[in-house]
């Protein structure tokens, strides 16, 4: 969520065992889906983990957290 150049995704997908979604306002490379992280193209309860870094410094960070809650699996 706000992945920058998606370095984390690139590192974690080297073994091809992990599915990583990388979202940012700028599509720096093929690993990134360009979107507003307050409204991602994922379904409800679709992901296990959300990672934020500097993206929570935005004015609408509450919307980002709400979106993470929506896409995270329960428990």
Image (cartoon, rainbow, N blue to C red):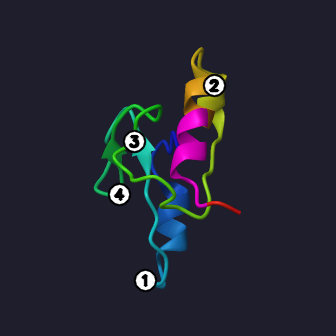
Q: Secondary structure at mark 3?
A: loop
Q: Nearer the viewer, residue 16 or 70?
A: 70
Residue for point 43% across, 83% down:
16
Does 70 lie within the magenta span? yes
From what the image shows, is residue 44 above or below residue 56? below
Q: Are marks 1 and 4 in contact (CB under 8 Å)?
A: no
Mark 2, Cα crowd under 10 Å, few <14 / some 14-19 / many 20+, is few
Q: Circle 3 sits on which residue?
A: 40
Cα–Cα gap, marks 1 and 2: 33 Å
The stretch in magenta equals 66-73
First in sequence: mark 3 vs mark 2:
3
Residue for point 56% across, 26% down:
63
First in sequence: mark 1 vs mark 4:
1
Q: Circle 1 sits on which residue?
A: 16
First in sequence: mark 3 vs mark 4:
4
Q: Nearer the viewer, residue 8 or 23?
A: 23
Horizontal and vertical percent position of residue 6: 47, 53
Q: Are marks 4 and 2 in contact (CB under 8 Å)?
A: no
Horizontal and vertical percent position of residue 19: 44, 71
Q: Circle 4 sits on which residue?
A: 31
Main SS of the magenta segment? helix
Q: Quadrant location of the C terminus?
A: bottom right
Q: Circle 2 sits on which residue?
A: 62
Cα–Cα gap, marks 3 and 4: 15 Å
């Amino acid at each position: 969520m706000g992945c920058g150049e998606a370095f984390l995704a690139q590192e974690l997908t080297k073994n091809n065992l992990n599915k990583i979604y990388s979202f940012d306002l700028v599509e720096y490379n093929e690993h990134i889906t360009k979107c507003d992280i307050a409204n991602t193209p994922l379904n409800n309860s679709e992901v296990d983990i959300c990672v934020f870094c500097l993206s929570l410094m935005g004015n609408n960070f509450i919307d980002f957290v709400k979106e993470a809650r929506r896409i995270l699996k329960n428990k």
